């Protein structure tokens, strides 16, 4: 995109605001280099990433970026085989810890919604805890190695401590001996060697080596001869310590070098995550939302706000074009907000095309433009001897040279700075030429000719910024569909200009022009009233919708409660019947015992059998009655394979899989279970069930829009059976919504889930074709399906 538009629309100020939220200088460079992406797919993906990051921020708080530093130069040095300092290794370890903790940060529980894009980015992170632990164990600070970094270092430092203790004891004795010759009763260090300060005149009285003298020459620093060997030993131990530290650093550098590719990938991934979360935090600052992206020039910004104006002062505006008209001519008084409206439109588009959330309400929509051209502000050049008009015209010539149907063109005060008649004619000509190229245009002007051009030209619409004549202040509200009224006479009258001057001015202007201005005022008044009515209507509609949804939930809960109570009553009744049957059987068993003992006559036996049959019949009839009350379905008149029916004894809908056999039984499927049942026990599905099902189906279908169905489904973490069920349901919804192509994310893993999904797609009714994802689509971890 051309740099001038980015500069004129002040996109650099947006970048500066985002850099407040970055953790490293490397990410800051990424922010400052940020420009609009080149495809709709890429923009959508970046917006999804930022939306997911915002969701994580809201649910889990700030990500673990603490302790992160810019380590690019250290990685480059290590890639070349160089050894790293303690500080550099410590910063690399901090980066490795940050990357590892980030994987823990995004880990989700079973009931949590996935963040597919962020999870995909984090999948490239390779935890290297062994290297991380080795560095933290060995290095305490920027310039400090731990005593226990190695056994040899521990021994050396222990010996050093002992030698230093011995030499300090020896120094005490020596200082007592030479106290009368010493400048001060203390010792000091010169060149890592212990010395004592001796007065210059007594230096020959102290047996030792002179290492230094004070700036005045009054004191010399002598190493007593009795300390030379001990100082030599300490110096030797210090050299060994230095060599051991270098060996430890070299060993740790070699470990980093051995995994340098993974270290670099982790670093790049952490920078990318820092970049995404910085954008999300800025989106939170401006109360941003993710816009919809289209490729057909449609713009619909709801309550959009200029992001560089104080949130407490900025006035939201509704800006729309691209459906019924592609050119918008905005008129109105100076300082009324015309230029701010243009800048808002251009800047918000650049933000959206860069994958940033925009300062507008949810549901806002922007279009993909390859170029945004902006001729805003006065950039006349004294050095080039260009007037205001010439400066603007120079830019307009460049715009006319390159603008096409994928360009958003913004003109501020088009045609100004020259003769009004010629300027207006030029402005109309420029707008018409760009309109014929199907550019999307927004322009501000004071010329009445442009208002008339918008009224008579198809695809061009008037707009204005509202002005309150009573207070002589702009309201900064944008009114689309109404040309702006100049209000020069009303403003002059309010400021005290005499009526005779205003009257004479009106007499000079043609009657048609005055009528035109009055018509504009009338339209403005009507628009304001219509806008107020629309707002009230929307509010009442939302309230009615809320009440309707609330009572629908209540009704559904009542239905469930009633059904549960009926079912409980039926269960209790069946339990009573079962107990009665068991008691009757017990009585009959007792009577049979009496019969075996020969104590029952044939007549009593006959009556007993009749009573038993009668009890069985009554219990069976009552049981069937209970089932009939539970089910209002009717007996099946015909039985066909594949038809749905109801099995009252299971209170379950089933699918008939076979015709009745010789026993009058059919094979049915209920959920995942198959069984043989008597065909006479099956009924039609109860009407209440059908009605509820149809209502739910209609409601679901009427609410199923393309925008509500995601173009991808994430199956990671599911078993094969659950995954197949979800994909089947998702493909049905995608087919109804009219999606042409969808992505099924199953991950790489062992390949079992991918194979199960591909086997299912071979025979799925909605799958026209399928393939594994290409580079940038997820590779083997994603299957792309073309919907019939």
Image (cartoon, rainbow, N blue to C red):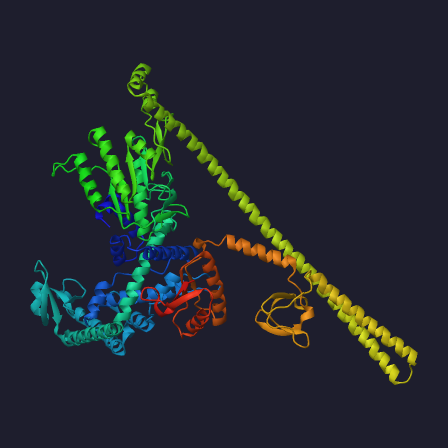
Which of the 4 image quarters holds residue 669?
A: bottom right
Give x and y (percent) for residue 156: 23, 76
Q: Which of 679 and 553 is in front in this view?
A: 679
Give x and y (percent) for residue 492: 31, 21
Location of residue 279 with respect to 389 vertically, above or below: below
Residue found at x 15% / y 77%? 229
Q: Is 185 situated left or right of 512 in this image?
A: left
Tell me if I can see residue 646 in this picture: yes
Q: Which of 318 and 11 is in front in this view?
A: 318
Give x and y (percent) for residue 299: 36, 45
Location of residue 628 with respect to 542 vertically, above or below: below
Image quadrant holding the C terminus, namely: bottom left
The total of numbered circles placed on residues is 0
Q: Which of 788 and 597 is in front in this view?
A: 788
Residue found at x 67% / y 56%? 562
Which of the 4 image quarters holds residue 455?
A: top left
Q: Is 346 situated left or right of 582 in this image?
A: left
Which of the 4 image quarters holds residue 593?
A: bottom right
Q: Which of 39 and 717 is in front in this view?
A: 39
Give x and y (percent) for residue 285: 36, 48
Tell me if I can see residue 308 in this picture: no
Instruction: Please identify the residue farthest to the top as the structure is shown.
Output: 500
């Amino acid at each position: 995109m051309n740099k001038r538009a980015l500069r004129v629309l002040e996109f650099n100020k947006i970048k500066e605001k985002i850099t407040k939220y970055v953790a490293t200088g490397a990410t800051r460079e990424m922010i400052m280099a940020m420009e609009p992406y080149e495809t709709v797919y890429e923009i959508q993906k970046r917006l999804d990433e930022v939306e997911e990051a915002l969701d994580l921020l809201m649910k889990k708080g700030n990500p673990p970026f603490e302790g992160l530093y810019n380590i690019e130069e250290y990685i480059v040095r290590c890639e070349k085989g160089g050894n790293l300092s303690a500080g550099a290794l410590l910063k690399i370890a901090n980066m490795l810890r940050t990357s590892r903790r980030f994987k823990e940060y995004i880990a989700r529980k079973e009931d949590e919604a996935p963040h597919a894009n962020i999870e995909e980015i984090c999948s490239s992170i390779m935890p290297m805890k062994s290297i991380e632990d080795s560095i933290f164990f060995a290095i305490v600070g920027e310039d400090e190695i731990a005593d226990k970094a190695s056994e040899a270092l521990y021994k050396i430092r222990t010996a050093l401590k002992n030698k230093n203790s011995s030499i300090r004891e020896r120094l005490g004795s020596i200082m007592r001996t030479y106290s009368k010759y010493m400048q001060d009763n203390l010792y000091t260090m010169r060149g890592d060697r212990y010395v004592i300060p001796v007065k210059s005149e007594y230096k020959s009285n102290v047996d030792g080596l002179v290492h230094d003298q004070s700036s005045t020459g009054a004191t010399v620093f002598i190493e007593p001869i009795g300390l030379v060997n001990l100082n030599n030993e300490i110096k030797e131990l210090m050299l060994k310590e230095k060599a051991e530290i270098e060996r430890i650093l070299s060993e740790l550098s070699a470990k980093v070098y051995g995994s340098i590719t993974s270290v670099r990938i982790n670093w790049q991934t952490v920078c990318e995550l820092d970049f995404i979360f910085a954008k999300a935090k800025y989106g939170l600052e401006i109360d941003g939302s993710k816009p919809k992206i289209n490729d057909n020039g449609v713009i619909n910004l709801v309550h959009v706000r200029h992001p560089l104006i104080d949130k407490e002062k900025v006035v939201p505006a509704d800006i729309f074009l691209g459906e019924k008209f592609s050119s918008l001519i905005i008129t109105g008084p100076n300082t009324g907000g015309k230029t701010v409206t243009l800048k808002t439109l251009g800047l918000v588009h650049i933000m959206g095309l860069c994958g940033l959330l925009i300062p507008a309400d949810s549901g806002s929509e922007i279009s993909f433009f390859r170029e945004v051209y902006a001729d805003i502000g006065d950039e006349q050049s004294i050095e080039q001897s260009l007037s205001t008009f010439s400066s603007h015209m120079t830019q307009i010539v460049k715009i006319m040279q390159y603008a096409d149907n994928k360009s958003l063109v913004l003109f501020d005060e088009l045609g100004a700075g020259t003769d009004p008649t010629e300027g207006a004619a030029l402005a109309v000509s420029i707008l018409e030429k760009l309109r014929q190229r199907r550019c999307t245009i927004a322009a501000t002007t004071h010329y009445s000719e442009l208002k008339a051009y918008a009224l008579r030209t198809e695809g061009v619409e008037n707009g204005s910024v509202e002005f309150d004549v009573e207070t002589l202040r702009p309201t900064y509200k944008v009114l689309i569909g109404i040309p702006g009224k100049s209000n020069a006479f009303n403003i002059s009258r309010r400021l005290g200009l005499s009526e005779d001057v205003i009257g004479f001015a009106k007499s000079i202007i043609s009657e048609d022009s005055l009528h035109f201005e009055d018509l504009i005022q009338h339209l403005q008044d009507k628009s304001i009233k219509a806008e107020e009515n629309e707002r009230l209507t929307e509010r009442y509609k939302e309230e009615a919708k809320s009440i309707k949804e609330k009572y629908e939930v209540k009704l559904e809960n009542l239905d469930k409660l009633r059904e549960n109570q009926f079912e409980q009553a039926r269960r209790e009744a069946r339990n009573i019947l079962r107990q009665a049957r068991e008691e009757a059987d017990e009585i009959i068993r007792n009577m049979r015992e009496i019969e075996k003992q020969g104590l029952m006559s044939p007549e009593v036996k006959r009556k007993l059998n009749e009573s038993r049959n009668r009890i069985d019949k009554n219990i069976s009839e009552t049981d069937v009655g209970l089932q009939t009350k539970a089910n209002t379905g009717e007996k099946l008149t015909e039985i066909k394979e594949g038809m749905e029916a109801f099995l009252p004894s299971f209170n379950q809908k089933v699918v008939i899989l076979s015709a009745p056999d010789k026993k009058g039984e059919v094979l049915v499927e209920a959920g995942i279970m198959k069984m043989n049942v008597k065909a006479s026990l099956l009924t039609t599905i109860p009407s209440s069930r059908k009605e509820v099902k149809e209502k739910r189906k209609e409601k679901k279908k009427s609410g199923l829009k393309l925008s509500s169905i995601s173009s991808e489904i994430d199956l990671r973490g599911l078993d094969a059976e659950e995954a197949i069920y979800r994909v089947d349901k998702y493909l049905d919804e995608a087919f109804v919504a009219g999606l042409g192509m969808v992505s099924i994310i199953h991950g790489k893993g062992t390949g079992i889930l991918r194979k199960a999904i591909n086997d299912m797609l071979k025979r799925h009714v909605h799958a026209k074709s399928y393939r594994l994802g290409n580079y940038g689509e997820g590779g083997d971890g994603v299957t792309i399906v073309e919907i019939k």
